[in-house]
Image (cartoon, grey):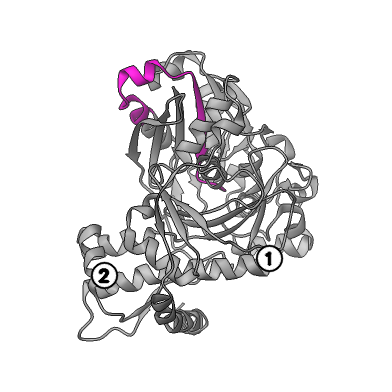
């Protein structure tokens, strides 16, 4: 058996993979997110480790006893800052934190080739701008830094005691030279970062270390297990769905959203707001449209209305088209690169119902994927069909709406909800050295296909056009209320 651990934003998810490739068990534990001020998003790394231990311990004892290797995945871009003793200096600044917008502009001004070097122009959620922000706003914390890790790599550190990352997570920091897959001295220089703070880089299926006895006891696992370096959530999700060869693509519907296509060469196009990153597997890169909000607005609206998601989605599917929603609750990356924009409804009226609001939210998520497809086309990449992963794949209505809006068939496998945790388990399986990657990284069987409907596509086209007018309009309005 092989264990995959995915440190998400809203939960830690685990997946146990059997040697024949079947999912033998899953478990998860929720995680809180703190917002200490407007635009800030943080988590306590101690809660990550506690939730990881609880999630693993909740797996059946016979499964835990049979584990032969462990792989890691996690949310990207977070700044985990440790002192010389390996202790956390402050809460982790997350991928959807917007405080470092000014620092991004200054990094680009200092190094105009930043987008070409690191695969995307620095954005506030990336790790490097956060270090520059810390040097100015929390100099006492900046002075204590001895190590900087990505979120999943902190879990790895707690397990094996080494400072290690993989190319895909390193890619999301703005410090990596994507062509050489090494840390860029220049990008470190312009972001107040000492390269000595940064971890070693190993491919996802390489062994980062062995499980220490104290960590094994906390997790309820056998000591000495090999721990694979793993991958950032996007790349691990790609491994889980078999997107490891040129042209393979998928969408991810988690807290954030991604449209991901694997490439055999490095293809940067920073002006399109597409991320061009190193993959966690050797000799491959990927292009990715990154949407900060993903399927999260569905849960947000359900929480706001205090109604079950399933009930609202049923009502949404039956509702007539009504309001238009801009889903930028925490800003947006692709295609706008705007951390300050926020969401809003247009067209509310006396007849607006909870179901019609949810329909607007579902359509808006689909519209962001239409923007992503257009951005990828601008970057020279097209998609004939895509697989889908993440919790949002549970909704047939959302899947069908995305297919209709993008005109691209979507496939859903039986393990679609497992996502990056499955990829992490697959990396662990290869790391053990018994199974060939070509066998382990196979594409899963598609259980359901969602084919675009010309009738629905034509009906949504006008609403997509209206949706695209909302961003500049709301941006103008927002400027007057801040």
User: Quarter of the image holding residue 459?
Assistant: bottom left
Asked if 197 appears above or below 35 in the picture, the reply is: above
Left or right: 207 as drawn, with respect to 307: right
Left or right: 121 as drawn, with respect to 310: right
Magenta region = 53-77
Residue 44 appears in the figure: yes
Tell me the residue that label 2 is attached to. 316
Q: What is the number of callouts on the image?
A: 2
Q: Nearer the viewer, residue 406 or 292?
A: 406
Asked if 460 appears above or below 66 in the picture, the reply is: below
Left or right: 364 as drawn, with respect to 236: left
Query: Helix, strand or loop at disc 1?
Result: loop
Neighbours of disc 1 within 10 Å: few (<14), some (14-19), many (20+): many
Q: Look at 67% across and 49% down and name the residue there.
A: 246
Give the percent coordinates (x, y) of residue 436.
Answer: 61, 27
Give the percent coordinates (x, y) of residue 375.
Answer: 61, 68
Asked if 232 appears above or below 228 in the picture, the reply is: below
* Mark 2 to mark 1 CA distance (whole Å): 34 Å
Q: Nearer the viewer, residue 369 or 306?
A: 369
Query: Helix, strand or loop at disc 2?
Result: helix
Q: Look at 33% across and 59% down and name the residue there.
A: 396
Give the percent coordinates (x, y) of residue 387.
Answer: 48, 52
Q: Is residue 209 magenta?
A: no
Residue 87 appears in the figure: no
Lower position in the chain sequence, tag 2 or tag 1: 2
Asked if 443 appears above or below 36 in the picture, the reply is: above
Point out the image quarter for the N terminus.
top left
Q: Is residue 72 magenta?
A: yes
Neighbours of disc 2 within 10 Å: few (<14), some (14-19), many (20+): many
Tell me the residue that label 1 is attached to. 379
Left or right: 39 as drawn, with respect to 232: left
Give the percent coordinates (x, y) of residue 340.
Answer: 51, 69
């Amino acid at each position: 058996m092989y264990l995959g651990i995915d440190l998400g934003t809203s939960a830690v998810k685990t997946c146990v993979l059997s040697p024949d490739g079947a999912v033998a068990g899953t478990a998860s534990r929720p995680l809180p997110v703190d917002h200490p001020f407007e635009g800030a998003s943080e988590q306590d790394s101690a809660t990550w480790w506690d939730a990881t231990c609880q999630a693993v311990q909740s797996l059946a004892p016979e499964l835990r006893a049979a584990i032969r290797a462990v792989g890691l995945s996690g949310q990207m871009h977070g700044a985990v800052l440790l002192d010389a003793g390996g202790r956390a200096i402050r809460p982790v600044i997350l991928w959807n934190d917007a405080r470092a917008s000014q620092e991004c502009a200054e990094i680009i001004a200092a190094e105009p080739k930043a987008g070409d070097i690191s695969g995307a122009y620095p954005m506030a959620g990336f790790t490097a701008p956060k270090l520059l922000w810390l040097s100015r706003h929390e100099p006492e914390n900046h002075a204590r830094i001895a190590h900087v890790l990505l979120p999943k790599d902190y879990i790895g550190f707690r397990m094996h005691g080494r400072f290690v990352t993989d190319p895909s997570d390193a890619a999301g920091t703005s410090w990596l030279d994507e062509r050489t897959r090494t840390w860029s001295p220049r990008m470190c220089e312009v972001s107040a970062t000492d390269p000595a703070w940064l971890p070693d880089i190993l491919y996802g299926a390489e062994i980062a270390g062995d499980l220490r006895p104290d960590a094994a006891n906390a997790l309820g696992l056998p000591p000495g297990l090999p721990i694979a370096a793993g991958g950032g959530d996007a790349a691990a999700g790609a491994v889980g769905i078999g997107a490891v060869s040129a042209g393979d693509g998928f969408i991810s519907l988690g807290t954030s959203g991604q449209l991901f296509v694997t490439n055999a060469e490095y293809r940067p196009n920073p002006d399109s707001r597409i991320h061009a990153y190193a993959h966690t597997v050797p000799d491959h890169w990927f292009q990715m449209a990154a949407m900060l909000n993903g399927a999260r607005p569905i849960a947000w609206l359900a929480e706001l209305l205090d109604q079950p998601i399933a009930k609202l989605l049923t009502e949404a599917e039956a509702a007539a088209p009504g309001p238009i929603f801009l889903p930028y609750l925490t800003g947006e990356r692709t295609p706008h690169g705007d951390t300050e924009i926020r969401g809003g409804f247009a067209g509310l009226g006396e007849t607006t119902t909870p179901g019609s609001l949810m329909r607007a939210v579902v359509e808006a998520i689909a519209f962001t994927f239409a923007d992503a497809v257009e951005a990828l086309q601008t970057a020279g990449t097209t998609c004939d069909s895509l697989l889908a992963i993440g919790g949002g794949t549970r909704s047939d209505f959302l899947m069908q709406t995305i297919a209709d809006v993008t005109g691209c068939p979507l496939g859903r496998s039986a393990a679609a909800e497992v996502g990056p945790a499955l990829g992490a388990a697959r990396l662990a399986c290869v790391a053990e050295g018994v199974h060939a990657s070509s066998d382990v990284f196979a594409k899963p069987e598609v259980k359901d296909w969602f084919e675009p409907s010309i009738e629905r596509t034509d009906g949504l086209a006008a609403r997509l056009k209206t949706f695209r007018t909302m961003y500049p309009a709301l941006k103008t309005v927002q400027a007057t209320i801040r």
